[in-house]
């Protein structure tokens, strides 16, 4: 699923995110969503989330 649409992501979803300092390399981090930080229904670069591990980044992939 796409990480650009807020309705695709719920608390507890397993996702791949790219953190701010990894944007150039595109390195992904996998984790579970603790909180959605983007209020808009869509964002072109991905919805920003907080993972349970405390990492913040934009969602690139949502596992169903």
Image (cartoon, rainbow, N blue to C red):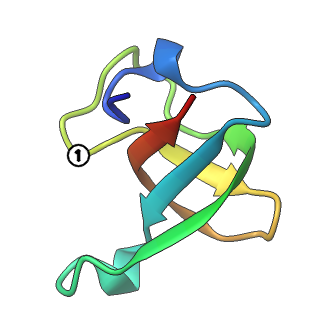
Number of numbered discs overlaid on the protein picture = 1
Residue at 79 percent of width and 36 percent of height: 12
Question: Which residue lies at the image location 67% right of the left edge and 24% below the top edge?
Answer: 10
Q: Quadrant of the C terminus?
A: top right
Residue 11: percent from left, percent from top: 76, 31
- Percent across and percent down for residue 41 are 39, 14
**Residue 33 horizontal side relative to residue 3, left or right:** right
* In this rendering, position of residue 51 left or right of residue 56: right
- Whether 29 is drawn above or below 12: the answer is below
Quadrant for the N terminus in the image? top left
Q: Secondary structure at mark 1?
A: loop
**Residue of label 1:** 45
* Residue drawn at the location 73% of the way across and 51% of the way down: 32
Vertical placement of 26 versus 9: above or below? below
33 or 61, which lies in front?
A: 61
In this rendered view, identify the residue nearer to me: 23 or 60.
60
Q: Is residue 20 left or right of residue 29?
A: left
Q: Quadrant of residue 36?
A: top right
On the image, the x and y values in percent for residue 58 come to 41, 53
């Amino acid at each position: 699923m796409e990480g650009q649409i807020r309705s695709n992501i719920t608390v507890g979803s397993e996702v791949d995110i790219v953190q701010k300092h990894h944007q150039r390399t595109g390195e992904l981090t996998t984790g579970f969503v603790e909180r959605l930080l983007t209020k808009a229904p869509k964002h072109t670069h991905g919805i920003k989330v907080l993972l349970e591990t405390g990492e913040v980044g934009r969602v690139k992939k949502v596992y169903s």
